[in-house]
Structure formats: C-alpha cells, structure tokens
Image (cartoon, rainbow, N blue to C red):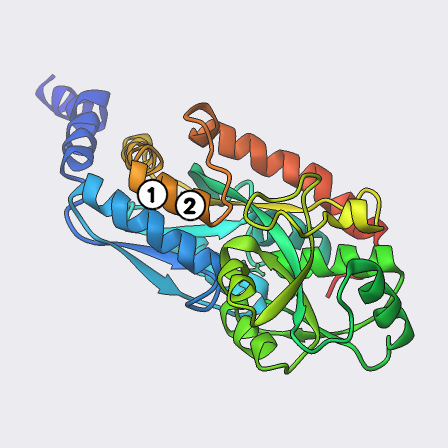
Amino acid sequence: MKRRGLLALATGAGLVALPVGAMAQAYPAKPITVIVPFAAGGPTDALARILCQRMGEALGQQMIVENVGGAGGTIGVAKAARAAPDGYTLAFTHMGTLAVNIALYKSLPYDSQKDFEPIGLGGTNPMVLVAKKDLPAKTFPEFLAYVKANEKKVQYGMAGIGAASHLGGLMLNSMMKVNVLEIPYKGTGPALNDLVSGQFDYMVDQAVNVLPQIQGGNIKALGVSTLKRLPQLPDVPTIDEAGLKGYEVTIWNGFFAPKGTSKEVVAKLNQALLAALGDEKVRARLTELAVALPTTEDATPEALRAQLKASIDKWVPAVQAAGVKPE
Ligand code: ASP
C-alpha cells in the first residue's frame, strides 16, 4: 500500500505539476539568448534589438541577441531548433528561413512547423528595390531596360539562399525574365555597405534596413514591394505600378522557441512581446522604419503558427513556379 502510494505521488500530476509551475514562476532567472540568423547591422538584427530591449525590461532579464549568419539563415535557425527547450534560447527570424526555404533546399536541418513553438509576430516589413547611386537608371522602367541590356554583367546582392532579400530578388528577376548573378552575404547589413560603395548593382531589402541610406542619398530607391506606396517614400512607385503587375513581397518576423518549451514560458515571452508592441516609443520607432505592427490578436502564438502555414502555402509553390531549383 505504502509503496503504491509513493509511486502514485512520484508519477502523478500533482508532483509533476508543482516543480513545473514553480519553474515557470521563476522564469526567467537568467539572461535569454535570442539567435538572429543573420549578421549584425541588418534588418532582422535591428528589429530584434528594438523588441528585445523592451521585452527584457518586461521580463526583468536581459534578452541578448546572438548573430549566427550564413546559408540564408538556416545555420542560426537550426541552432535554435537544437537548443534546450528551457526558454533561454530563442530565435527571432523571418518567413524566408521558415517558409520560402522549403522550396529552395533539398533538405533543411529543421522542420519549421514541427521543431518550434511560435511565440509571436514581431512585425511585417515592406521591401524596397535599391540600386547603387551611379547605376545609369533613374526610374523603374529605365532599370528594367538596363538590366535586360546588361544581364551578363549586372549583379544583385542578397543574404543567402532563402533570405528575404533572395525572395525579393528572385521574384523580381523572374518577373523581369532575367538571369542575374547573385552575390550572397551573411546578412543585408554587410550587403548594404557594399551597395553603398558600389560593389554590386541592386538589392531588394526590407525598408527598415535601407531607408536611412536612401534618405541620406547614398543609394537610390527604384520601387517598393507593396501594392501601396510607403509614406516614408511617397515619390517611389510600387514595383507593381511601375511595370511588374502583381509583384508583391512583404516579410514577417517573429519569435520562436524550440519544440517542447513549456506553455507557461511561451505565455510569459508572449506577454513580454505584447508589452514591447504596446510601448509608445517602440511603436513610434518601428512605424518610422515602415514596419507594420501586429494587432494583439495577430501577435498570439496561434496566429504566428497560422501565419507560418499560410506563408508555406503561398510561397513554396510561387518560388517553384519561378523556376528556382533547390540546392
Ligand atoms: N533579413 C535579411 C534578408 O533576409 C537579412 C538580414 O536581416 O540581414 O535578406
């Protein structure tokens, strides 16, 4: 009798529930590492830092960004997938690495839908087609004509296979019907530096990264990737209106924890994200950088899971139809 009672206690819900509950209450007891799967100084990094700063305040622990760039973000995302599911290692990444990539790699080192617990959406980003300052094209139609006439020598920059800048560039090139040499970087932060110094010709990247350089006159904006013009760039046409009907690419970012992270921890992290997204200073900064902020409903873990699924359903066939062969 006695023995059975003890066993029941040891395996029963009561005993198991107590330490888990106590652990969640104490969480976070130390700084949290947030893997950004691209180089420092790029858009994913910039957004992660803005959000993590405020989320850390809400959690009472620092959230430290770790940049793990390479292979279009797959190296960093794989590292996050394999981390202990204890809430102390997360990923802040985008739909390129989790959805688009499925069409672009023969085998990925993670399963986006099975290996993560979504925490919440960080924001949605428009992209901008930017070119080096001295590219001899001032408008989108001139750009189109120039690239077609110089297809063999023109080069475009991107942050590796499956990066957002790759998606933006490959859809553009496919619709322009050109095959242009791509120059891969570990992130569009370093790529942007090279565009400013004229090392390659053009790139499609998130507005958050390129706006300051456009506004400073160091690169030129030839089109935006949304169906509406951006208030920050009122004179820049949409790529759709300028000649490539139907071109539309926006990039969402979100926080993900390794599979098996407890519901309590996910809920705490989501609360911290909501605190950041509700903060006036954070909102003002992100709005200035053209980031569309999610509503409270769109920032739930369930909404991010649905968003991921919708992006896979949308982009995998679209990329396949563009004729890009998986690596
Ligand atoms: N988000 C960028 C891209 O996917 C990379 C970066 O954040 O540096 O192209």
Identify which residue, 116 or 192, lies in the foreground.
192
Instruction: Say what amino acid the circle numbered 2 marks.
Output: Leu
* Rendering coords of residue 105 (x, y %): 69, 60
* Rendering coords of residue 322 (x, y %): 83, 54
Residue 16 shown left or right of residue 243 in the figure: left
Question: Label 1's element?
Answer: helix
Question: Label 2's element?
Answer: helix
Instruction: Say what amino acid the circle numbered 1 marks.
Output: Val
Label at residue 189:
none
Label at residue 286:
2
Identify which residue, 228 or 297, lies in the foreground.
228
Q: Write the residue at 17% across / 37% down.
A: 23
- Regarding residue 258, the answer to whether it shows in the image is no
Q: Quadrant of residue 36?
A: bottom left
Task: Give the residue number, with chain letter if any, for mark 1.
Answer: 282
* Rendering coords of residue 220 (x, y %): 64, 66
Identify which residue, 152 or 232, lies in the foreground.
232
